[in-house]
Image (cartoon, rainbow, N blue to C red):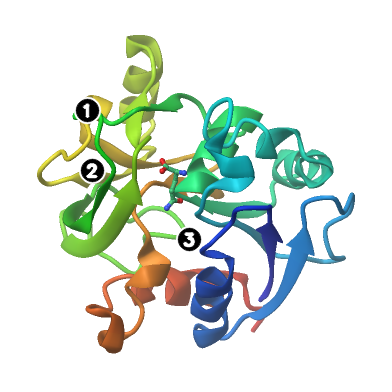
Amino acid sequence: MKAAVIVFPGSNCDRDLAVAFEAAGADVQMVWHKDTELPRDVDIVGVPGGFSFGDYLRCGAIAANSPICNSLKAHTDRGGYAIGICNGFQVLAETGILPGALLRNAGLKYICKTVGLKVATSNSAFTQGYNAGDVIDIPIAHHDGNYYADDATIAVLHDQARIAFTYTDNPNGAKAGIAGILSENRRVLGMMPHPERACDAGHGGTDGTALFRALTGVLTPA
Ligand SMILES: NC(=O)CC[C@H](N)C(=O)O
């Protein structure tokens, strides 16, 4: 599996994401936000967490207008895979690749802790390493993680089983407790919690490993 990780000024989880991909067997290339082309034959694009452009304007809004995001959009329009984690989810929402928006946390505080996530569907390359209903422990670290979409959009996400993860104990006010969603073709995942920070027992847990392993399993030619 060939993975590309986009780096914006202010990204701070780009290396962590690359390490998680590599540990699962991927070849990883880092891509600077000013580049206009993704590497050839890339199987999946990772949009990492952090504070791109200092979170000015709205989290992810400036990054979403970077030159590389045109290629990212073309890649997902072609049916390419992508994962956006935390600030990466914010970027995917700002580009319109995923529906909805990430608002300020309901409690107006930055939250940094490990939370319980319920796996809402195992029907995706990202979540097939889990069983629906599993509860996994994954860290969050954000101030704008409060997922919002209008009721019609939430109903579509429900009906199409595109809610990937929900919080067991909603920390940020996210509508329907949503922590992560899939695109309509199930090939793009955006999630606020950080699975790449839960891939090494030395970091406190390994519940994120199954996500990266399942992806590699699907995207690595036999
Ligand atoms: N860890 C992150 O990616 C932070 C995301 C975002 N900048 C926020 O605080 O909401």
127 relative to 205 in the view: left or right: right
| Relative vertical location of residue 74 with respect to residue 82 in this rendering, above or below | above
Percent of width and height locating residue 191: 40, 47
For the residue marked with disc 1, what is the amino acid? Ala
Marks 2, 3: nearer the viewer: 2
Q: Residue at x 50, y 54 (%)?
A: 49
**Disc 2 secondary structure class:** strand
Reading the chain from its start, which is encountered first: label 1 or label 3? Answer: 3
**Disc 1 secondary structure class:** helix
Write down the residue under mark 3: 125
Q: Which mark is residue 176?
A: 1
Write down the residue under mark 2: 166
Reading the chain from its start, which is encountered first: label 2 or label 3? Answer: 3
Q: Which mark is residue 145?
A: none
- Marks 1,2: beta carbons within 8 A: yes
- Marks 2,3: beta carbons within 8 A: no
| Relative vertical location of residue 204 with respect to residue 197 in this rendering, above or below | below
For the residue marked with disc 2, what is the amino acid? Thr
Q: Residue at x 36, y 76 (%)?
A: 209
Percent of width and height locating residue 105: 28, 31
CA neighbours of label 2 inside 10 A, class few (<14), some (14 to 19), many (20+)? many
Q: Residue at x 75, y 33 (%)?
A: 65
| Relative vertical location of residue 207 with respect to residue 178 in this rendering, above or below | below
